[in-house]
Image (cartoon, rainbow, N blue to C red):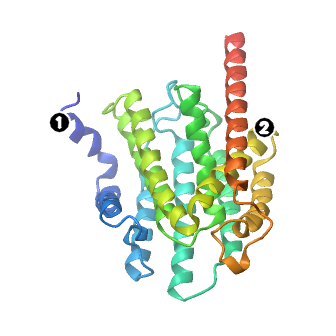
Amino acid sequence: MPGIAQWKKGLFTHEDSQYLHKVFGFPVLAHILFRLISVFRNPFNDLGFKATPVTLGLVILHLGLSVSSLIFKIPKVRIKEGSRIWPEFRLHSIVFACRSLACMALVWYEKRYDLAPMYWANVLIVMATLVSADIATNSVDPISRSNTIRGLETSAAYKFAFSFMQFLGTTGCLFGLRAFGGQFGIVFIIQTYAFTLTLRRKNLVSHRATVIFYTCQLSIGAAVAQIEIWQAGGVQALFMFPALAACAMLLRIGLGLNKYLVWAIMGMVFQFARKASSVAPPAERYAGWPEWGWPVLAAASLTASFGLFVLRSRARSAESIKQA
């Protein structure tokens, strides 16, 4: 177990001699703790967020934390176990944190000026994120590239859960519930996981600990999102989101469709989905969609996507063994 001296040496480095990253880091940590505590105090209060200048300032604060991580020099190659931060991951972490922060800023703008939801803006944010992620990947040396989940040493079940949560996160951004909590939950996951991988790089935590921490981070972020989804549409919405995420996963992994095409298709599907559940006001709902539709679709799509994921994982493992 690392001692206090080792933690101090690992966290306070000459690369941040002006304490720029820490200026953002410590307030962000305090903010995260405050929001998590607010879940227990008042779970149905959107984590206490309001369309105030303070909320916009906090969005900028979290943005500053992600961007300021670029001052650090990190190893070019991801280690075999996959739990140490590497260049492509750092850039993707910034890009996807910006995606959720942009969604929060959009909700802030609409609420602040009493505007109708601009769902087209959510589509633009998601598509811009895909482009930015590709630019980030192409900007680093090929040896610095690695699939975040596929390159992680852990079981197929964990990999499926982690991959599914990525699809669920994009689903949440694209669907666009008009609240702050769910998107903040995604920001929480991204920024705390990046910190966890940094701790691994400093040998302050073990590989197993990073997997456990990531599981906990995903669970906390998902719990916050589930509260928001429940408030927006009750049981139907709780089944709708995993059903849509699993369908996107099947399009991407099962049919091998280009990611831009997958999320363009899902963007159109969401226009129907919003009005096929209790998320929409009664007067705007499709009368023909049955109440059992989303639970059945969720069960079928999740079962199919998990089975497919296991088969693909076994095929990749067999190919790796054959090449070795």
Q: Residue at x 51, y 71 (%)?
A: 179
Answer with mark 2 or mark 1, whichever residue precedes in sequence: 1
Q: Amino acid at mark 2?
A: Gly
Residue under pointer 1? 5
Q: Is residue 181 above or below residue 77?
A: below
- The answer to whether residue 130 is left or right of residue 63 is right
**Quarter location, residue 89:** top right
**Quarter location, residue 174:** bottom right
Label 2 secondary element = helix
Q: Position of residue 45 (x, y in %)?
A: 40, 71
Q: Nearer the viewer, residue 251 or 129?
A: 251
Q: Residue at x 74, y 56 (%)?
A: 263
Q: Residue furthest left?
A: 4
Label 1 secondary element = helix
| Residue 142 visible somewhere in the drawing | yes
Judge depth for marks 2 and 1 and give the one in front.
2
Q: Position of residue 242 (x, y in %)?
A: 63, 50
Q: Amino acid at mark 1?
A: Ala
Q: Position of residue 191 (x, y in %)?
A: 44, 52
Q: Position of residue 194 (x, y in %)?
A: 44, 46
Q: Residue at x 64, y 48 (%)?
A: 167
Residue under pointer 2? 254
Q: Is residue 82 above or below residue 11?
A: above
